[in-house]
Image (cartoon, helix red, strand yellow):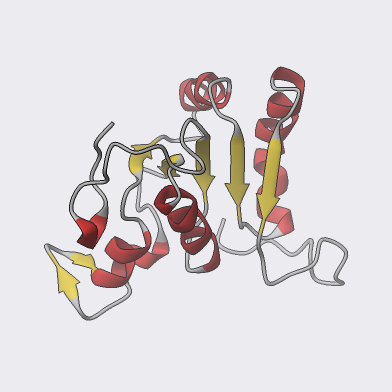
Amino acid sequence: MLRPQGRAGLRMATPSALEGIRVLDFTHALSGPYCTMLLSDYGATVYKLEDPGGGDMGRGWGPPFAGGLASFFLGLNRGKYGIAINLKDKRGAALCLDIVDKMDVLIQNFAPARWSVWVWATRRCTSVIPAWSTAASRATDWTAPRATRRRWT
């Protein structure tokens, strides 16, 4: 299987450590996209899910820019498939659940208060996929005094 892979051109048809693993990427900024970039580099198929109204905040972090997108964003999201879904819309949420049914891993790095809005995705995942894996990377601990504060909503 050949697929785009950033600076390296095309990935060779040799098996990779994570080939066949499907990752749904709900991440933004730096830590999450870097994590899923590494998973993609090791052969996982990564689907980056973004809001159609603006997407990842990293899209505007520059200069430098290439084709209107920050090079920072392009570098961290190489080798991923992009999906834009409005999760606040019932049809968008239903579509997301259909996608979740086909994934092996979900990775997110929202603040705890923000992720609680989307926790339905994790509940769905654990009920559909017995060996479901989730990972979270954030600056705020779930139990920190300000963890429930809502920002960027």
Q: Depth check: give the residue in front, 34 or 97.
A: 34
Percent coordinates x, y for residue 28 in the rendering: 48, 59
Single out the residue that lies furthest toward the left. 67
Q: Depth check: give the residue in front, 14 or 6.
A: 14
In this picture, residue 102 sits left or right of residue 66: right
Percent coordinates x, y for residue 65 in the rendering: 18, 73
- In the rendered image, which quarter is residue 139 located in? bottom right
Indicate the quadrant containing the C terminus: top left, top right, bottom left or bottom right.
bottom right
Residue at 53% x, 47% y: name it. Answer: 26
Q: Is residue 151 above or below residue 22?
A: below
- In the rendered image, which quarter is residue 16 located in? top left
Indicate the quadrant containing the N terminus: top left, top right, bottom left or bottom right.
top left
Q: Depth check: give the residue in front, 12 or 141.
A: 12
In this picture, residue 40 sits left or right of residue 59: right
Percent coordinates x, y for residue 35 in the rendering: 53, 59
Percent coordinates x, y for residue 42 in the rendering: 45, 50
Residue at 22% x, 81% y: name it. Answer: 63
Q: Is residue 65 above or below residue 143?
A: below
Q: Is residue 137 above or below residue 139?
A: above
Single out the residue that lies furthest toward the front. 14
Total marks placed: 0
